[in-house]
Image (cartoon, rainbow, N blue to C red):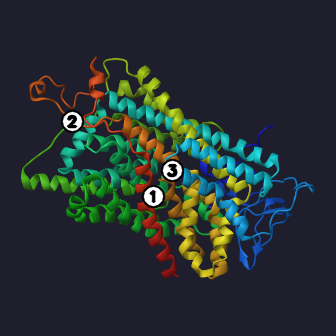
Amino acid sequence: MMLPRWTGGSRAARIAAYCHGGWPHPGNAPGGRQSLFPRIRQVVRAAPGRPARYAARRHDGIPCGSLTRASGAQQSPSDPAGVRARDAPRLPRGLPPRLSEGHPVNALLAALPILVTIGLLAAKVRAPCAALAALGTAAALTTTTFHTPVADLRDAQLRMLPMLVELAAILFGGMLLSDLMTRTRAQAALGDRLGGACGSRSRAVLLIVFGVTPFAESLTGFGIGVVVAVPLLRQLGLTPTKAAITGLLGLVTVPWGSLAPGSLVSAELGRVDFQQLGVVSALLSAPVFLICGAAALTVAVGPRHALRAAGELLMAAGTLWLTVWAVNTYVGVPLAGVLGGLATLAVLLLASRLEERATGIVHREPVGRALAPYAFLVTGLLIGRAVLAATGIEQGWWTVVAGPAGWLLLTAALTPRLLGAQVSVLPDAIRTTAARWWQVTLTTALFLILGTLLTVTGMSREMAEACAALGPAYLMLAPWIGAVGGFLTGSNTGANAMFAAGQSATAHALGYPALHLVGIQNVSAALASGGSIARVVLAAELASNSPGPQRVSPEDQLKATPHHHLAPTTTTTTALTTADTDPVDTGRVLWTVLTAHAAVFLVLGAVALIWR
């Protein structure tokens, strides 16, 4: 079976399209304002007058606006989501009828895959096994209660494949780059420079959490912020478990990850202005920055030292928050996370420089060459985006080659040369990375398939409708609905494709500003994607294979290679040893991150009740 022609080249377009079960005809899609993703509207909006497999409807006075099955339904002005798909076959008459729409038993059954996942993870079952069990549960429900044509299921999964291939390439390139940076001791040089320049571990942790991670994640997305942050945190002396937790808590600007396609999908499906959504998301990110920053600092340096660094925490979080808000307000949404991370880096490094002048203690480690791979990657990404924009290429595999996947693989291949490696480290690094990469990719793929299945079968809609029936009390649960999507898919775009339209429609039914509720959906889904199983497994793998700071004996210190020398020798394996070889406690990583996120969701729920 041939796949339909892509109608948009961005990841946001592809994810939104497969989540909504079809591809509108490109000639019928309405135009829209210019942006970095000008054709996403062609995918997520309706083709006027065409039949839909999923159409918005109203139930008990509450417009659901999310993926509701209504074969043959026509577009109407009252459609709150504006989501239309291609023609789809009706359900066979021989199938037994489903329970009545909105029935609480339906909602409970729809939540079973999620409950199975959480229960098995709490029992310390491995993530792939938990995902398989949840998939089996969802498949059983599909055949018994949430009847869906096999063709629809097959089409949805096939449309997911290009995005999954791109994701797998990004994960491999990111993990390979991290391994090469470790083998060439470039990571050690950067860690020494950060520790020396910041003057204290607390400030260095804040610089990574609020500067390095937001910058890397906002530029590339897909958890690459964790790939950059975790090895640096290990070089600061954090144990593998603490480094994994702290790195994940640094994923605080995911609404602007990969230049904000997830936020754009949320704006389109929620029928709100893109820039206004960016501003609201920035305002709502204040508790995200404060709570996650405080949790990361507490984990990294302990409660006592974290309390002493409260002033620096407020300075770093405040700088990031003000910059992200200002860029969204006066510049535009896509660059907010990138510029926010850079501004925070500049402020913290400036504070360290002023402190050096006051104390007379100067730390200078040459790290220019150690930064060469990252500089090459950033430059390549900017050039790739500029070339695609200039040529008008918005679809096909060229968007993958010129995007993060292509440039990460190219950067990894050139890293030994960029760092001046004296021995061949690339073959060994590829073998080591491949042995770890397939486990991370398998976990990511399984949960992505699960999220797709919950969307196509209408299970996500059932859960949202059950919560919407609570009336005004729904506002407290709105962040948790977005969090479910982010946790299952590991993607802000995928989570918004699942729930943004329903959140907007429910807000209209409750007389609540749709912009506020869609903003809460956007922020909560983005934050929860940083705590997804796929991200936790990635962080754990990186932390367990990243060395900590070497401890050299006094008699060997004179013989040791200087920190700024990046070329590995035949003793490369010695450089990879670490004084702290404790295994990563994946369960502790997951539940610590989820606890911090839960605190944020409680605050966002309270904000939703107050902010009208």
**Who is closer to the viewer here, 531 or 195?**
531
Residue 10 visible in the displayed image: no
Q: What's the amino acid at mark 1?
A: Leu
Label 1 CA crowd tier, 10 Å (few <14, some 14–19, many 20+): some
User: Earlier along the polypeptide chain: callout 1 or callout 3?
Assistant: 3
The residue indicated by pointer 3 is 123
- Residue 78 lies in quadrant: bottom right
Q: Name the residue tied to disc 1.
A: 594
Looking at the picture, how far across and down is residue 509, in whole percent? 67, 79
Amino acid found under the numbered disc labelled 2: Pro
Mark 3: which amino acid? Ala
Mark number displayed over residue 366: 2
**Is there a contact, CB below 8 Å, between mark 1 and mark 2?**
no
Residue 359 point in image, percent of width and height: 7, 53
Q: Residue at x 68, y 55 (%)?
A: 454
Name the element at disc 1: helix
Q: Position of residue 23 (x, y in %)?
A: 75, 51
Instruction: Check the image and name the residue furthest to the right.
Output: 93
